[in-house]
Image: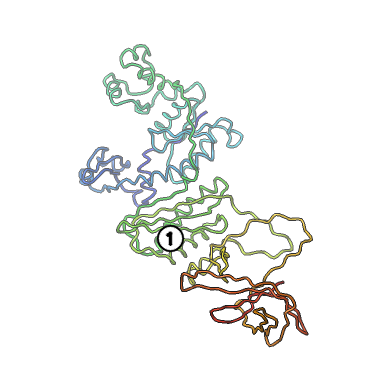
């Protein structure tokens, strides 16, 4: 059994979805290079006013009350992704009918246990398509092409019992079979107007006059043409793109956020349909003058909350505003498995990841990108060498069985504490630290380290590990000598 989704006048429906003010007004869509733009389609009100496909833009503009709008292929690609995502909720095997934009065929065998019988499934499917913003016809048949023809020729929901395809197609106009222009003219000259009239002809006579194409059209009219289904295998990540071309340049952030909110909501619906979350958002703003302004928002954990994602986009764009007015915007998303955690009954609740991300974004806006994040040590010997990297929670640690080995850690003093040192034979023997005198009991070193001698920020030092003893305390620490400043200081103590 096949269920076919057909969205009549798909390009016009997409234009209305992007520009709601066109919904109740006659309009025509044009494409091509100016001034040779031609009308490709129009809504019913515009066709009633005399607009026809193939008219030039000038001819369409002379008809009073008709708005002429340029076709945006990117919007249609996004709309197709929405339709495909909705269809995926009802069947894993889907074929796109290439010659009919916005038409998909679903293999619904075995779906009765999930959605009920064919009529219930078709009604539920049409309701979901309507909620997505499209008006669609749904046809269910055991024959693939019969379902496609019924979806093109009948409004609403059509369910054909097995074996009744010819009767269901009988009164449909001949154009639902998608004949060539030459064959359509031939049938018109013969007085053939419906599928039933074509099916009533003798197949051998039809083949003798128009060739093997006559056999195919005859079987299509009877609902008996065999079809081998080629299911789509799309990349889900390629569908996580939303594009919008603006009628007028936008300079303020507030109207831009209104559009980004709608685009983010559409992307969230797609990832949630796959039980996923958004791990990254990339905003591409096409600016007046031909430049692009691109920003990347990557939360530490995948998020499913629209308000949090929108707030992160707002703070990032406020921190890095575009340099010119915006003509077009794109929003790309990357999906990932949502973060799940279970808190203990007697443990304090940790802050939500989304709220933490918003706080970090606010801090980046106030302090700068290079002052907020996680500290990462550099692989070098320069003292206090680190860099700031974006915050990301560490992976869970694997449980390691306890061992008897004892490890020590150097607790670095920031800033280093200046000390006085008494030397004997270039080795420290006594240390004056914090007003107390220590005697060096054990010593190891020196280790001479240096770096960046080729620049003004060159550095060098001699390090010693010493065990200090006094009347009241004993300490194990690392002291260092800076030859440039001729100063001794405590680099850190060992725990």
Residue 416 position by quadrant: bottom right
- Indicate the position of residue 76 as horizontal and vertical percent values: 38, 44
Q: Residue at x 47, y 50 (%)?
A: 266
Q: Identify the secondary structure beneath mark 1.
A: helix
Residue 338 locus on image (x, y percent):
59, 52
Q: Which residue is mark 1?
A: 257
Q: In percent of the image, x 49 and y 73: which residue is there?
A: 457
The reply to whether residue 225 is visible in this rendering is yes
The answer to whether residue 439 is left or right of residue 353 is right
Residue 102 x %, y %: 41, 38
Q: Position of residue 476 (x, y in %)?
A: 72, 75
Nearer to the camera, 97 or 434: 434
Q: Quadrant of the C terminus?
A: bottom right
What residue is drawn where x is 47% and y is 65%?
315
Image quadrant in which you'd find residue 258: bottom left
Q: Is residue 470 above or below residue 476?
A: below
> Residue lying farthest front?
425
Residue drawn at (36%, 39%) of the image: 9
């Amino acid at each position: 059994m096949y269920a076919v989704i057909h969205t009549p006048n798909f390009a016009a429906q997409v234009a209305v979805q992007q520009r709601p003010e066109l919904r109740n007004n006659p309009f025509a869509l044009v494409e091509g290079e100016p001034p040779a733009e031609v009308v490709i389609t129009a809504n019913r009100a515009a066709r009633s006013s005399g607009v026809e496909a193939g008219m030039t833009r000038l001819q369409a503009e002379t008809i009073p009350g008709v708005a002429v709008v340029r076709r945006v292929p990117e919007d249609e690609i996004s709309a197709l992704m929405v339709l495909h995502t909705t269809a995926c909720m009802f069947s894993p095997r889907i074929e796109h009918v290439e010659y009919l934009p916005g038409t998909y065929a679903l293999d619904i065998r075995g779906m009765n246990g999930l959605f009920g019988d064919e009529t219930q499934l078709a009604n539920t499917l049409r309701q979901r398509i309507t909620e997505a913003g499209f008006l669609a016809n749904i046809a269910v048949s055991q024959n693939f092409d019969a379902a496609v023809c019924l979806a093109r020729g009948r409004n609403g929901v059509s369910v054909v019992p097995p074996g009744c395809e010819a009767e269901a197609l009988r009164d449909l106009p001949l154009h639902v079979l998608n004949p060539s222009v030459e064959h359509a003219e031939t049938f018109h000259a013969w007085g053939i107007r419906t599928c039933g009239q074509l099916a009533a002809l003798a197949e051998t006579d039809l083949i003798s006059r128009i060739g093997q194409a006559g056999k195919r059209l005859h079987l299509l009219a009877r609902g008996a043409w065999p079809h081998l289904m080629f299911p789509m295998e799309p990349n889900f990540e390629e569908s996580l793109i939303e594009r919008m071309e603006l009628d007028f340049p936008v300079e303020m952030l507030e109207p831009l956020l209104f559009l980004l909110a709608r685009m983010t909501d559409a992307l969230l619906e797609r990832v949630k349909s796959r039980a996923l979350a958004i791990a990254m958002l990339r905003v591409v703003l096409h600016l007046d003058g031909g430049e692009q302004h691109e920003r990347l928002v990557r939360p530490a954990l995948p998020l499913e909350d629209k308000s949090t994602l929108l707030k992160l986009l707002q703070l990032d764009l406020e921190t890095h505003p575009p340099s010119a007015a915006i003509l077009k915007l794109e929003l790309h998303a990357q999906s990932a498995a949502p973060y799940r955690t279970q808190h203990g009954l007697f443990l304090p609740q940790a802050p939500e990841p989304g709220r933490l991300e918003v706080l970090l974004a606010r801090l980046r806006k106030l302090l700068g990108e290079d002052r907020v994040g996680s500290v990462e040590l550099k692989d070098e010997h320069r003292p206090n060498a680190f860099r700031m990297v974006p915050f990301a929670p560490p992976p869970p640690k694997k449980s390691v069985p306890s061992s008897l080995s004892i490890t020590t850690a150097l607790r670095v003093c920031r800033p280093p504490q200046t000390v006085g040192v008494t030397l004997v034979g270039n080795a420290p023997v006594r240390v004056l630290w914090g007003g107390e005198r220590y005697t060096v009991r054990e010593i190891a070193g020196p280790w001479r380290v240096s770096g960046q001698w080729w620049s003004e920020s060159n550095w060098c030092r001699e390090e010693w590990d010493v065990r200090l003893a006094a009347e009241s305390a004993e300490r194990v620490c690392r002291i260092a000598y800076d030859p440039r400043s001729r100063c001794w200081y405590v680099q850190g103590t060992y725990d």
